[in-house]
Image (tube, rainbow, N blue to C red):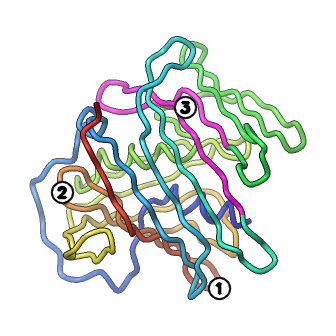
Amino acid sequence: MIKKIFLIGLLVLLAVPLYAQKESQKSNETPPTAGELLKWHEILTYEVRYSFVKLGEVKIEIVGDTLFNGNKGYYLKTIISSSDIPFVGDHKERFNTIFAKAGGSFKPLTFWIDDIGDDEFNTTRYIFDYQKEKVYGYIKEGNKRDTLALEKPATAGHLLFLLSRLQAGMDTTVTFPVYIDLKEKKIFITHTAKKVKQKSKAFKEPVMSYYTYGHVNFSGPFGFSGKFEAWYTAGPLRIPVEAHVAVWLGNVKLKLIKYKKELRK
């Protein structure tokens, strides 16, 4: 259940609390292109809190170039570390995606999850076959497998971290098919050009950020309603700064606390 909270926060990427909705303004700034995002080696660390309880941290990094089945790709890595929560314990999982640049966007080639804490790897795996337009899924627990129709633009999780930044601030609504639990679900995102100032420990001063909202068509833990709000910095890279999803007991928040970037070699 805790893993699903993290994953939903990661998919929502990056909602903010309702109190941050102040007077807004329009902007003609354009979001980054796929090529511009790939120029940078970024490392982002988020703190995850449920009410006053720290659930853990999420660290996202585009590690570098790689190959998959002979195709050039890029490796996106996300490590989720949960705190020593009563009745839950200490957990550490790694979400992995090898993806390719596809025109002005990105497409996943394969996605998998490693349970680092328990030394179990490939606990979940998806492979995207664009020639046959199929998605091959596998869940180790129960040895479950399935073949699904490939609907574009597809993702199996955290690649949305990059995909959503390509439209942030652009007054547009987009739908992304998401493959989860061997089923195809959808996340609906409406980006707007509205801006507010947002505080973040990752930056010395409050940053102007674009407002985004949306919902998912699957149920989450603790009564997650499916609705969310989001902010991305108004700078050229549209950095996600905070996540906020409502659950029946309160709110789960992901806040950016560290940000590092350097030009990719």
Mark 3 is surrounded, within 10 Å at the Cα level, by few (under 14), some (14 to 19) or many (20 or more) other residues, namely: some
User: Mark 1 or 2 closer to N-term?
Assistant: 2
- Closer to the eye: label 2 or 3: 2
User: Mark 1 or 3 closer to N-term?
Assistant: 3
Viewer-side residue, 164 vs 73: 73
Please indicate whether residue 72 sits to the left or right of residue 265 in the image.
Answer: right
Q: Which residue is mark 1?
A: 249
User: What label sits on residue 185 in the rendered view?
Assistant: none
SS state under label 3: loop
Q: CA distance from mark 1 to mark 3?
A: 34 Å
Query: In the image, which residues are magenta?
Result: 91-113
SS state under label 2: loop
Residue at 37% x, 27% y: name it.
101
- Closer to the eye: label 1 or 3: 1
Residue 124 locus on image (x, y percent): 72, 40
- Closer to the eye: label 1 or 2: 2
Q: Which residue is mark 2?
A: 235
Mark 1–mark 3 CB contact (< 8 Å):
no
User: Mark 2 or 3 closer to N-term?
Assistant: 3
User: What label sits on residue 151 in the rendered view?
Assistant: 3
Type of amino acid at the residue the image marks with label 2:
Gly
SS state under label 1: loop
Residue 48 versus residue 133 in the image, above or below: below
Type of amino acid at the residue the image marks with label 1:
Leu
Residue 261 versus residue 201 in the image, above or below: above
Type of amino acid at the residue the image marks with label 3:
Glu
Residue 195 locus on image (x, y percent): 20, 69
Mark 1 is surrounded, within 10 Å at the Cα level, by few (under 14), some (14 to 19) or many (20 or more) other residues, namely: few
Image quadrant containing the N terminus: bottom right
Residue 147 versus residue 19 in the image, above or below: above
Residue at 76% x, 34% y: name it.
138
Viewer-side residue, 58 vs 110: 58
